[in-house]
Amino acid sequence: SRQVFAGHKVSLLDHHYKTVGNNTENLGKVYRSFNDHQQYYILTDNGQLKSVRSLSQLYRMFPEFKHELRRYAAQHHLSFSTERREASLTSCVSYLDTLIP
């Protein structure tokens, strides 16, 4: 695991891991494939660690800031697709850290 963003009230962590995929056979040889996975977690100042992959999950974790987060994500054209998830989560969590008293 590594710390992607360290805030005063919330932090963003990630965990990269691989799983074994399907075996394929070609000309008598067996080839094994591996799948890469990236999982993100929110760590709050009270020690809670929760998995997060989307903006809607952030809304459920912090319902009191739902409207602010929604507006921020729309204004900054954030996308939570696999390719842009880390940057968007980092941006949202950084903004969320400024909202929490």
Image: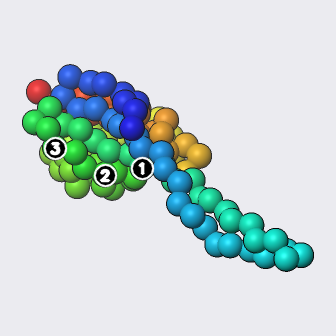
Query: Please, what secondary structure does the residue beneath circle 1 have?
Result: strand
Q: Amino acid at mark 3?
A: Gln
Marks 2 and 1, how far apart at CA: 7 Å
According to the image, label 3 marks what residue? Answer: 48
In space, the residues marked 3 and 1 are separated at their CA atoms by 16 Å
Q: Which one is in front, 9 or 63? A: 9
In the rendered structure, find residue 51 and report the number of the disc placed on it. Answer: 2
**Residue at position x 53%, y 60% in the image:** 19
Q: Can the viewer see residue 62?
A: yes
- Left or right: 77 as drawn, with respect to 43: right
**Residue 48 occupies which quadrant of the picture?**
top left
Instruction: Evaluate if marks 3 and 1 touch, with contact meaning CB atoms under 8 Å apart.
Output: no
Dot 2 crowding, Cα within 10 Å, few <14, some 14–19, many 20+ = some
Q: Position of residue 45 (x, y in %)?
A: 14, 32
**Residue 39's disc number:** 1
Which sits earlier in the primary sequence, circle 2 or circle 1? 1
| Location of residue 36 in the rendering, given as x and y in whole percent from the top left corner | 57, 53
- 70 up-or-down from 29: above or below: above
Q: Callout 1, which amino acid?
A: Gln
Instruction: Give the x, y percent position of residue 56.
Output: 33, 55
Please tell me which residue lies in front, 34 or 77: 34
Residue found at the far front of this picture: 28
> Is residue 72 in view from this perspective?
no
**Quarter of the figure that contains the N terminus:** top left
**Label 1 near label 2: C-beta < 8 Å?**
yes
Query: Which residue does the image show at 62% across and 59% down from the upper left?
Result: 34
Structural distance between the alpha carbons of marks 3 and 2 = 10 Å
Q: Which mark is residue 73?
A: none
Mark with earlier residue (3, 1): 1
